[in-house]
Image (cartoon, helix red, strand yellow):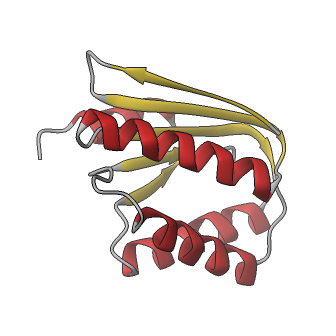
Amino acid sequence: MEYIVQYREDQNIVAATAKGEWDPRVDNDMVREVMEIVDASGGAKVLLDIRELRFDISIVRALERALEVREYRQGFKTVSRRTAIVYSSVNEKVDESVIFFETVSRNRGLPFLTFTDMDKAMAWLLEDK
């Protein structure tokens, strides 16, 4: 798994792009880097582009991941107000896992929405709310 994290100061967005085969350890590194930038920026919004990331996780693993991310966020003073996760809908199992992850995350107070369309994700991130 490879990733790049950039801060778009003009939009107050931390943009992370990940590709390759999903690796939870590398994903943790990426999440940490994103959260450090969010914390330093005072609450940037997050765009996570995982359209080129290959993952095949179970519903149980999606639940565990949402709980891990929530716990990890608690270690930071400032967290994102919105996080858009853009993924490729390659099959029904991926869709189910991603939608379940979103539901669990939102039920735990995390401001995550998933999208398959980058323009819709950006529009949601840039809404004035």
Residue at 28% x, 52% y is 78
Seen as rendered, the residue at the extreme left is 129
The image quadrant that residue 18 belongs to is top right
In-image side of 30 versus 69 (left or right): right
Residue at 78% x, 55% y is 25
Q: Nearer the viewer, residue 105 or 96?
A: 105
Which quadrant does the N terminus fall into? top right
Q: Nearer the viewer, residue 129 or 6?
A: 6
Q: Which of 33 and 105 is in front in this view?
A: 33
Quick check: can you spot residue 114?
yes
Q: Where is residue 109 in the image (x, y as percent from the top left)?
A: 33, 74
Quick check: can you spot residue 116?
no
Seen as rendered, the residue at the extreme top is 10
Q: Position of residue 53 (x, y in %)?
A: 77, 42
In-image side of 97 versus 123 (left or right): right
The image quadrant that residue 24 belongs to is bottom right
Q: Position of residue 124 (x, y in %)?
A: 30, 42
Asked if residue 83 is positioned above or below residue 75 in the image, the reply reads above
The image quadrant that residue 14 belongs to is top left
Residue at 63% x, 43% y is 30
Q: Position of residue 29 (x, y in %)?
A: 66, 46
Circle count:
0
Asked if residue 123 is positioned above or below residue 112 in the image, the reply reads above
Asked if residue 39 is positioned above or below residue 5 in the image, the reply reads below
Residue at 30% x, 18% y is 9
In-image side of 64 versus 126 (left or right): right
